Image: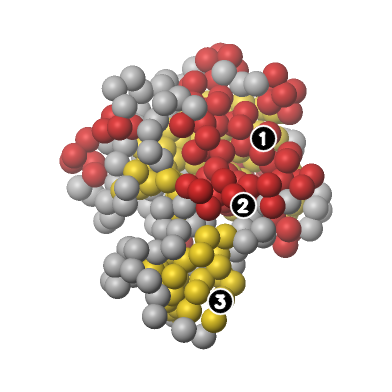
Amino acid sequence: MEKRIIEDNLSYSAHLKIDGIHTFRELDSTNTEAMRILESGRNGIQLVVANLQTDGRGRRGRRWLSPKGQGLYMSLLHPFTCDVSALQALSLVSALSVHESLTGKNVPSLQLKWPNDLLKGKKKLAGILLELRTFDGVTYIIFGIGVNYSLGESQKAKIDRPVTDLAEMVSDIPGREEMVGTICSTLLMKIEKFIAEGFGPFQDSWNQHDFYYKSNVVITNGNHCQSGKSLGVNKDGALVLETSEGEKIISAGELLPSLKGAKESFG
């Protein structure tokens, strides 16, 4: 990863905000490295990028396959002074940032899956893992972002769910350093807007691109399971689920398509 190219693709505002850019040929995990940077006493906004991850991870402890040069692996360490409970919807804001950045580079037909995946059809292109840490009384969130670039069939066969990559979708794939700069700039801009205005301004955009909007879904959270029809997200970023018992507000969990069928009406 060329640090200079990343810097060249940052917006002027992002240049001013970022306190450090750290590039590596190989890491266990960019999120883990961001934690190490924080614990070493370097605070402020820090960007970590790697060409290879040996222990990349996703949500719910899943492994994120991160072969050399075949994906974008980055983490952004960001401090927050507001109440932690107000930050839940940042997962969705992160996904919207990646969605906007990729569509701005002519990647077509991308959709979102609550709370923070990017899909092409039912195949996963990108995922996001947010981790919260408190250091010296300050709350930090690490935004871990992974985008599949050119996994190849042998790599895809190792993954336990349908996935896709940019090589399947576009002939002119944007450079990884270019995308890191673009995603980082967009994410920082949207974080600033979120802090000032909350999730409300992002609600319509999410629902417009939500792959499972008005679809029957199942939400799992630990041993609890709830089925119904997704009505999109509310102004706080929580999922609104139409069930036989009325509307339920879901703030956490894993969304799965229902066996009833993607667009079948509930009931």
Contact between labelled residues 3 and 1, with CB atoms less than 8 Å apart = no
Mark pair 1, 2: CA separation: 18 Å
Going from the N terminus, do you reach mark 1 or mark 2 first? 1
Kindly identify which numbered label has been placed on residue 188.
1
Contact between labelled residues 2 and 3, with CB atoms less than 8 Å apart = no
Residue sitting farthest toward the bottom: 245
Q: Nearer the viewer, mark 1 or mark 2?
A: 2
Q: Looking at the picture, which amino acid does disc 1 mark?
A: Leu
Residue at which label 3 appears: 247
Task: Report x, y in % for residue 266.
Answer: 40, 75
- Residue in the foreground of this view, choosing between 5 and 106: 106
Going from the N terminus, do you reach mark 1 or mark 3 first? 1
Q: Is residue 141 visible?
A: no
Name the residue rendered at 72%, 62% in the picture.
85
Left or right of 244, for residue 63? left
Kindly identify which numbered label has been placed on residue 15.
none
Residue 262 quadrant: bottom left
Residue 14 quadrant: top right
Name the secondary structure under disc 1: helix
At label 3, counting other C-alpha atoms closer than 10 Å, the crowd grade (few under 14, some 14-19, many 20 or more) is: some
- The correct choice, above or below, for 214 with respect to 200 in the image is below
- The correct choice, above or below, for 242 with respect to 145 in the image is below
Residue at which label 2 appears: 203
Name the secondary structure under disc 2: helix
Task: Report x, y in % for residue 88.
Answer: 65, 58
Going from the N terminus, do you reach mark 3 or mark 2 first? 2
Name the secondary structure under disc 3: strand
Left or right of 42, for residue 131? left
At label 2, counting other C-alpha atoms closer than 10 Å, the crowd grade (few under 14, some 14-19, many 20 or more) is: some
- Residue in the foreground of this view, choosing between 135 and 109: 109
